[in-house]
Image (cartoon, helix red, strand yellow):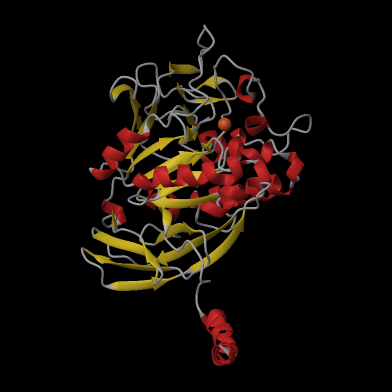
Amino acid sequence: MMKLNTDLKMLLPLFIVYSLLSPCSATDYFQPEQIHLSYGENVYDIVVTWTTYSDCKSSVEYGIEHIALKAHGNTTKFIDGGSERRVMYIHRVLLSNLTSSSKYVYHCGSDLGWSGVFWFLTPPDESKWSPHLAIYGDMGNENAQSLARLQEEVQRSVYDAIIHVGDFAYDMDSDNARVGDEFMRQIETVAAYVPYMTCPGNHEQTYNFSNYRARFSMPGESEGLWYSFDMGPVHFVALSTEVYYNFNYGMKQLVKQYYWLEEDLKKASEPENRKKHPWIITYGHRPMYCSNYDFDDCRQHSTFVRSGIPVLKWFGLEEMFYRYGVDLSIWAHEHSYERLWPVYDYKVLNGSVNQPYQNPRATVHIITGSAGCSERTDPFIPNKPEWSAFRNSDYGYTKVKAWNDTHLYVEQVSDDQDGKVIDNIWLVKDKHEAFNNLK
Ligand SMILES: [Fe+2]
């Protein structure tokens, strides 16, 4: 017995050194979960993001058709703000300079645990690409009604990417962020196969949007609150409308985003950039207009996002969108679908009586927030305002396909009606330019 104790004492320093050098502690949860993709700084850079509950390294093994390459990334410790202070580790690995028109397979993890194998497709030469996206907001862990249809479509490679326009999980921080974990596991079924691009909504505001900022990996330097990226003929701009409504976190973010946006739109409007990416499409959670039967800000005449902060009227976005010729603005928050006529400051500025969306003279707005959540869908006020073209409260989502420089197709799918297309428009632009040039 004495001999054994002596041996253990001798081994103790060795054990401590081993523990310190080991990539992970000896207990726990190294199995990757909640795997999702996003674009990096361009569409041939893909970021793989996932979660473990113990600290370990971040690697992705990948390749065209079979695994042949390995990339390493970083691990960030995230502590949820709830009473349990739950700890998780968010892993991010960038796969850069991918080959166009290829099917990549990948798995992620570390030597202590690997995910199953997933796949994604890379776009062709961007100048020959007509990207197709599913776009929606307001999808929760409970009653995520549209998800099954999206899962099936993603597996058939219908989409190049998905955009989720705020309000996730209901809410990601709920039950000490377990609802966020469950939601991220749910969307893995689509988000591990196509880039899942996001912006924050009001349901992400707890603990200063920390669950949102920690769990997603968007381009740029704002932790996914605002950023832009190009897909073929489209320049997408993601915004946080929440900077207009959460002054408890200060006004700095609002000012930063506003000046960033002005710079981004100015750059996107430079002739050589607009030639390459003529369509400018913005997305943000809370709409400038809506005709729902509720008391949300979009029911007010001068919404904060449209006209700026109360009284001072600073930082409103509608005038900026008009000045840079934003073609399409996509919103959510209202749990319904609403398509507006081209509108500026409540004036309907259709292209012509017969072809309203052919060379429209203002931005077209679409509100698509009925993917499915525990709060159910939202009804409309009885009399449709003159700026509203089509409204529907079915569960569903929007599909957008940018066919080329002049033609963009938008349709609304009703999940309640078994995938029926309940609305569609062709937005046609012979020229993309500032709307105030058209006066
Ligand atoms: Fe919302």
Q: Residue at x 45, y 36 (%)?
A: 327
The answer to whether 57 is drawn above or below residue 153 in the figure is below
Which quadrant would the N terminus be assigned to in this image?
A: bottom right
Which percent across, then down, holds residue 169?
51, 38
Q: Residue at x 73, y 34 (%)?
A: 309
In the image: residue 69, left or right of residue 295: left
> Residue 304's image quarter?
top right
Which percent across, then down, holds residue 384?
50, 10
The answer to whether 253 is drawn above or below residue 312 in the figure is below
In the image, 293 versus 203, the foreground residue is 203
Question: Number of labelled discs?
Answer: 0
Task: Identify the residue at the far front of this view.
Answer: 1
In the image, 276 versus 439, the foreground residue is 276
Which percent across, then down, holds residue 46?
39, 60
Q: Quadrant of ligand 1?
A: top right
Which percent across, then down, holds residue 246?
70, 38
Residue 67 appears in the figure: yes
Q: Residue at x 24, y 58 (%)?
A: 101
Task: Identify the residue at the far left of this view.
Answer: 65
Residue 121 appears in the figure: no
Task: Identify the residue at the far top of this view.
Answer: 382
> Residue 312's image quarter?
top right
In the image, 92 versus 380, the foreground residue is 92
In the image: residue 5, left or right of residue 413: right
